[in-house]
Amino acid sequence: MTHLGADVAAFVDGQLPPARELAARRHLEECERCRGVVAEQEQLKRRMARSMSAGVPAHLAAALSAVASDPPEPDPRSRQALRRSVGVAVALMGSSAAVLLLAYVLAPPLPSSGDPVGPHFDAYVAEFMSEAASRRAPDIVAASSAVAASSDDVPLSPAELDELDADGWPCHAMLAGDLERVDGRLVGDAVVALRYLGEHVQLHLIEQVGRLDDAALAGFERRTLADSVVWVREGLPNVASWEADGVVYTVVTDASVASVAEVVAQLPSTPDRSAVERVEDGLHRMTGWVSAA
């Protein structure tokens, strides 16, 4: 296991899944650096608990205590929207701006897992452009096939791809309405590369175990596509990347960004959170700290 990184806050709050918590505890036994980071986070949590107990307006503290003692069952986002807005509006009217700002900053990150992944965007684009050229010039196809045959990639049959898809690893037969899966291959032991073709359009989809490394996103723009956080680099081709459920997805395509949004909608993704949702998440986290004090 690498350093805890973004998992530190979830570990301190007791929100990691059992398997990841066990792995984190084993890592902490050997890693002095992460032990220090966890100790700092725990100290901040204790300090915030004391501050919240002493300084939050009475009506807001009562509301937070009620939430902590009787948490509601999770609802679909559509049914939570009104409740979120009302709760934050009450806080806006009766609490200090400093508390709300702190709640926004302390909002826990959306869950992610696995080692950091820096997708090889330029290599993906080069492969995409090579395939596009081979489709226009049949004499290049033979050379491209020879290179592929000499690699360590393992071709996956249509039946194997369908089985992966049924088991929860997305290998959909169709994407964005009219893009048809033409083949797929296993790259190493944790990457699946898929090719899709439509009329005058092609798309490559690379799925890799891990979490998206922010350091790899230079030149990308953070966007909201299909209500989800996606990093986009427009050009010829367009490149988009995002993470969800411990997998990094990368799309390389000559289709429009609107078509990329359709692809995102069909695959696991990470919902974008509004400022209201971040404040509420931060308040919930602060409430948990008060209750634990």
Image (cartoon, rainbow, N blue to C red):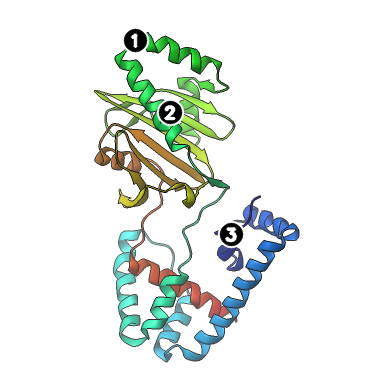
Q: Quadrant of the C terminus?
A: bottom right
- Badge 1 is on which residue? 138
Q: Position of residue 31 (x, y in %)?
A: 71, 59
Q: Left of 201 or right of it: where is 182?
A: right
- Badge 3 is on which residue? 16
Task: Look at discs 3 and 2 and give the one toward the viewer.
Answer: 2
Q: Mark 2 is on which residue type?
A: Leu
Residue 203, by quadrant, is top left
User: Considering depth in this image, is 170 or 147 the residue closer to the camera?
Assistant: 147
Q: Earlier in the sequence, mark 2 or mark 1?
A: 1
237 is higher (above) or lower (below) than 156: below
Crowd around label 2: few <14 · some 14–19 · many ≥20 (10 Å)? many
Badge 3 element = loop
Q: What is the number of the mark on residue 194?
A: 2
Query: What separation in Å lies between label 2 and label 1 (alpha carbons)?
Result: 21 Å
Q: Earlier in the sequence, mark 3 or mark 2?
A: 3
Q: Position of residue 258 (x, y in %)?
A: 25, 41
User: Considering depth in this image, is 1 or 167 the residue closer to the camera?
Assistant: 1
Q: Left of 28 or right of it: where is 99?
A: left
Query: What separation in Å lies between label 3 and label 2 (alpha carbons)?
Result: 31 Å
Residue drawn at x 32%, y 16% as measured from the top left:
135
Q: Are marks 3 and 2 in contact (CB under 8 Å)?
A: no
Q: Mark 3 is on which residue type?
A: Leu
Task: Look at discs 3 and 1 and give the one toward the viewer.
Answer: 1
Q: Position of residue 90 (x, y in %)?
A: 32, 81
Residue drawn at x 46%, y 29% as measured from the top left:
193
Q: Position of residue 181 (x, y in %)?
A: 37, 25
Crowd around label 1: few <14 · some 14–19 · many ≥20 (10 Å)? few
62 is higher (above) or lower (below) than 125: below
Task: Look at discs 2 and 1 and give the one toward the viewer.
Answer: 1
